[in-house]
Structure formats: C-alpha cells, structure tokens
Amino acid sequence: MTEFIWPVRVYYEDTDSGGVVYYANYLKFMERARTEWLRALGFEQDDLLNELGILFAVRRAEIDYLRPARFNDALHVTASIKNKGKASLLFQHEIRAAGDGQLLCRGQIRVACLDAAGFRPTSIPEQILTVIPDGG
Amino acid sequence: MTEFIWPVRVYYEDTDSGGVVYYANYLKFMERARTEWLRALGFEQDDLLNELGILFAVRRAEIDYLRPARFNDALHVTASIKNKGKASLLFQHEIRAAGDGQLLCRGQIRVACLDAAGFRPTSIPEQILTVIPDGG
Amino acid sequence: MTEFIWPVRVYYEDTDSGGVVYYANYLKFMERARTEWLRALGFEQDDLLNELGILFAVRRAEIDYLRPARFNDALHVTASIKNKGKASLLFQHEIRAAGDGQLLCRGQIRVACLDAAGFRPTSIPEQILTVIPDGG
Amino acid sequence: MTEFIWPVRVYYEDTDSGGVVYYANYLKFMERARTEWLRALGFEQDDLLNELGILFAVRRAEIDYLRPARFNDALHVTASIKNKGKASLLFQHEIRAAGDGQLLCRGQIRVACLDAAGFRPTSIPEQILTVIPDGG
C-alpha cells in the first residue's frame, strides 16, 4: 500500500458563496484520508488515545490550490508517506476529480505524535511504526 | 439585561454555494451569542468546566429560516431567556440584519447543565442561577 | 424505499472540545443523507440547479439531541419523507450508532423548493414529485 | 498600517475533541483578518464582486502550528503584506494569545485576484493596488 485513496463527495457544507470548496475544507478532506489510511493499517485513533495515550497533531501544512472543486463533485483524496521519522510523519496528499483524474489540490502535512496528557512530542509506538511504509 | 445582542459578520467560511449562509451555521452564531451573554453575566465557560466541573449542552433546537443572510452581511444575534429551570434554560434567539433590522432567522434552544465527567444532567450552580434573569 | 440509510464516520472536524460531536454538525450529517437519498432517486442537485433552475432550502429544523456521538463513531443517518407537499417536503431523520443502533439524535427538517434566481418558493418539478414516496 | 490586528475568540465550533482548535480552523481566522484588513482599507468584498467582477482566491498556504489555542481563548490575528504583485498578494499572518502574546500559529497565504465569471487570474484593480502597502 504505497498510495491510499479515499473518496469524498462535496456537499453544500464544504462550499462557499464563491461557488467552490472553501479553502480550509480541503484540509478536512486530507485528514479524513489520513484517518482512513491509519484505519486500513489496523489502527483506530480512539484506541490509540485510550489505550496508548497518544494522538497525532499537525505541525505544518503546505497546500497548493490548483483548480477549484465544486458542489456535488466526486473527489479522490490520496494519502501517502513522504518521510517517516521516529516521532513524526510527512504525508503527501493529492485531491483529484474522480471522473477525469484532474489534479485540484496538493498538500504536504507534517504530523507529530504527542502524548495526549501533556501535548508533548513522543515516539510513535513501535507497533505502529513497523507497519507504516517507508516514504519516498 | 432582558435581551443581549452580539454582532456577527458573515465571512466566506459561513456561506455555501447557494450564495447564502449555510443552514447549520446559524446555530454557531446563536451559540456565540449565548457564550457572550454568559460572559457578560460574569461567567467564563472554561472556568465553569475547570472549577465547577459543569458544561452546558444543547438538548433541543427549533430553528425557523425566514430570509437568507449573505456574504459580508453584518448581523445582530440576540439571546434572551424564555424559560429558566433548575437544570436547564430555554433560550430565544433572533438573527437580524444589522442595517434595517429585518428578521432573518429565529431559534429556540434548550440547554441543559451537565456534569462534565459523566455527561449527566445536574443543577445549575446557585451562583449562576441567581444572576440569570427569569424568562418571559 | 421508505427509509434511506447513509453511513457517516465522525472525524475530528465534527467534534468539539466537550469531546462530542458539535451540535450544529448533526445538521450537516442530515443534509448528506437528504442529498444521497435524492441521488438514489436519480437526481443530482447540481443538475437540478443548472437544468431546472431550482434548489432546495431549509425552512425549519427541529432537532432533539438524545445522546452524544463521539470521535471515530460510525453512525447511520436515516432520511424519510414525513409529509410531501407541492412545494415543500418534511423530512424525518434519525442518527443512530452503527454498532448497537442506539438513537442519538432525531430531526424534522422542512425543505422548500426555490427558484435559484430569485430565491422564491416554487413547485417541485413533476418529474421529481412523482418518484418521491408519500409521507406517513 | 504595516500590521493589522483582528481579535478572535475561540468558541466550541472552532475546537475538536483533542481539546484544541481544529487545524483547518486557523485558516478561517486568517481569512477573517484578511477580510477586515481589506475593509479597513476601504474595500468591501461583496462590492468588489458586484461592481468590479473580481474576487480573491487562495493559491497556496503554508501554516506552522506552534502551540495549540484552546476553547475560550482570546486571540490576536495579524495580517500584513509580505509581497505585493500585480495580480497576487502574499500575506503573512500570526496568531497570538491575546494575554501574553505567545505565538501559536504562523501562516503565509498567497491570494490571487480572479475575474469572478471565469475564475481566471486578472490584475488587481489600480484603485486597490495603490492603497495596499508594499511588502517587506
């Protein structure tokens, strides 16, 4: 599994009066893809929180908005690992039109593993790290 | 203080591709007014949570959408108590155009006091109840 | 098709710092169900807008919040017609935990057909009305 | 006016079940600051759309999340011009705690001027460009 694809439908809630998806909402779509990617690897984030006391938090986001998505569009949101560290992961995301595959939006998101109690950086648990593919 | 007014500006984030404020977002505006009303009475909700272990949760909402608000509109959101119980409050909200006062949206929201640990109904602390005006 | 069920997963974007789904976001879930219900009947809302010049707008919402949904919960959102008029539809929605079926939230939403140009009430086109089941 | 400051209060709507402001919502705060900055310069975006047929759309965002903002926090969101082009503007934003001024989040947002009809890049109208300060 080097690239993971999650389908997203654009609803009214995602759009703005410019007639397109509101720029902050692409970050929601990318997080849905990261969440489902982690679930596909066998990890539920509420279990990670309750059993291991960790959560993942975004440290940095770089987003390029290339073409607008619109109401009722069917989208494909990808998630892949670009760089895998001991305590953080760099994700690469692409958002494409489901129909013709045109690239609409691209993101690089750095996510850090935090202990939930103190919100401080901590190592990604070994059981997770071993199943995350190396980036590249 | 029988009626409290909180100004709200409509940004792109609040609108949808229909060109108007998205219907769920009026509930955000009403909650901002309730929060600021409570602050004006002298209560900060993070203190209520940390010191008294309580929070307020919505039990029921009735919203009438009369005329749409649009991008960049200046709005006045009111909050007033319609009914004051020992463990819950019924709020009346109106959202009006700031310019001509035209009524756009009206809501009745029942809010219950919960203990934050167990999410169970509990009495509104006396120190709060005494300063909340009677409804009517 | 008397009841339509649409699955919704709760992501971080849907929750608030009370640890539960933010109260306005249940309205997003209900609209996703209405949209997918209409799609299942054969109608795409962007086509309705572009070809017939109509859109559906919410006139009134009554929501009962019974039990909170939480981060990572899998939900089932139902949509069914409670009352079918010439120019408006009354929807009944239920939001249940996908696992044990426990009822979390219930809504009645009145939706009016509007001409998109003037935002005025208009009749639901006959081709749509004939395939919408009678309420009850 | 080399730096513009817009106050933002964190409401429940802005937070997530991690107990902090949801990462996409900082982009909403930054856009509110850009909108109010433009208003302070004398320009209303609905007038720009209706009278000049232009709107501003985000092309690229770089966000660094340094420390989390939490429920009920009072924030100061700054907007300043880092680079001023003929058809696009590069904004620098900082989000600080209103109390102690601690830096929580930093963003660079490139905004392009588009003709609203075709969503194509166009020059920023001269009447706007002349009152926008040079970046640096």
Image (spheres, coloured by chain):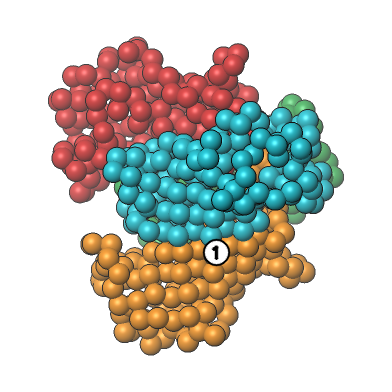
Chain colours: A green, B cyan, C orange, D red
State the image coordinates of residue B118 (x, y, percent, origin top left). 82, 48
User: Is residue A65 at least partly visible in the picture?
Assistant: no
Q: Quadrant of residue B67?
A: bottom left
Q: Quarter of the image for the C terminus of chain D: give it.
A: top left
Q: B49 or C44, which lies in front?
A: B49
Q: Quarter of the image for the N terminus of chain D: give it.
A: top left
Q: A116 or A78, which lies in front?
A: A116
Left-right relation of C65 to C53? right
Residue D64, compared with residue C81, is above or below; it is above
Q: Quadrant of residue D65?
A: top right
State the image coordinates of residue B41 (x, y, percent, origin top left). 61, 31
Residue pictured at 30% horizontal, 27% vertical: D38
Q: D103 or B123, which lies in front?
A: B123
User: The residue marked by circle 1 belongs to what chain?
Assistant: C
Residue pictured at 47% horizontal, 86% vertical: C133
Left-right relation of D43 to B25? left
State the image coordinates of residue A25 (x, y, percent, origin top left). 48, 46
Residue pictured at 42% horizontal, 47% vertical: B95
Secondary structure beneath disc 1?
strand
Residue B63, compared with residue D34, is above or below; it is below
Left-right relation of B120 to C60? right
Residue indicated by mark 1: C62
Q: B57 or A73, which lies in front?
A: B57
User: Is residue C78 at least partly visible in the picture?
Assistant: yes
Q: Amino acid at mark 1?
A: Glu
Mark 1 is surrounded, within 10 Å at the Cα level, by few (under 14), some (14 to 19) or many (20 or more) other residues, namely some
Left-right relation of A2 to C121? right
Q: Quadrant of residue C50?
A: bottom left
State the image coordinates of residue B38 (x, y, percent, origin top left). 61, 35
Residue pictured at 38% horizontal, 70% vertical: C112
Counting the numbered discs, the total is: 1
